Image: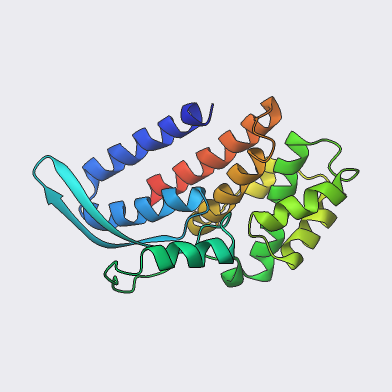
Amino acid sequence: MLAQLVRPLVRSQIQLLTQAQSAGTKLVGMVSQWLSYLGVQAHVTELSTCGEHIQVSLRVGRPELCTEAEWRTILNNLQNSPPTPAATPVMTELELTPAQQSRVQRILAHVIRAGQPQALEQWPTLAPQLQRLGLSDDMIAGIHAALKVPTDLNDLMEHLEPELSAFILSKAIGLALLDQRITRDENAALKALYQAVEKQVSCN
């Protein structure tokens, strides 16, 4: 089902690349954006063509579902890998303004409610799962509060910034996959998020 949601966005981005004067800059942003949907902090450090292929070099940070101990073990295993130059990071929770934090909390609460209508009653079980997705205690507390006041998703999605759309989408996918299934309501919420990202990409 996720593949069906992703393909229209992939198609729109392919069309964008064929029309962009600075296709390299656009593609760099797209690579980082798509990996951020999976909770992976990845920054493109080099991009070039190689025959019929595109060659991309990445700097990858600790995935949100990877513990610190696991990441340290991975780094030790890869200690002989050459370092990569610094790159501009994608948006993180610490960079959100109070207004953006509130919007994120309300949208994620909507996604949670779509998959788990009894989320408030299940909160003791749900809260630890949100922590494992890399959400801060303040963000989780805000989501808990937002669950008590349902809001219209269309209103929340209006004029959503591109960087914020990507941040929310990466978290929403993680939330939808917590129970390894996607309900009809979750599907609708994810589609709305994808369409918002697609619209923002097309405008840039």
* Residue 180 appears in the rendering: yes
Residue 37: x and y in percent read 50, 48
Residue 149: x and y in percent read 85, 49
| Image side of residue 15 versus residue 65, left or right | left
Residue at position x 63%, y 31% from top?
188
From this view, report whether residue 178 is shown above or below residue 99.
above
Look at the image and name its color scheme: rainbow
Residue at position x 86%, y 51% from top?
124
Marks counted in the figure total: 0
Q: Closest to the observer: 99 or 52?
A: 52
Residue 123: x and y in percent read 85, 49
Residue at position x 40%, y 63% from top?
77
Q: Extreme left residue here? A: 51
Residue at position x 72%, y 61% from top?
102
Q: Extreme right residue here? A: 121
| Image side of residue 75 versus residue 142, left or right | left
Query: Residue 65 occupies which quadrant of the picture?
Result: bottom right
Residue 51: x and y in percent read 8, 43
| Image side of residue 1 versus residue 44, left or right | right
Q: Closest to the observer: 80 or 156?
A: 80
Q: Closest to the observer: 127 or 15?
A: 127
| Image side of residue 62 versus residue 134, left or right | left
Q: Quadrant of the N terminus?
A: top right
* Residue 149 appears in the rendering: no
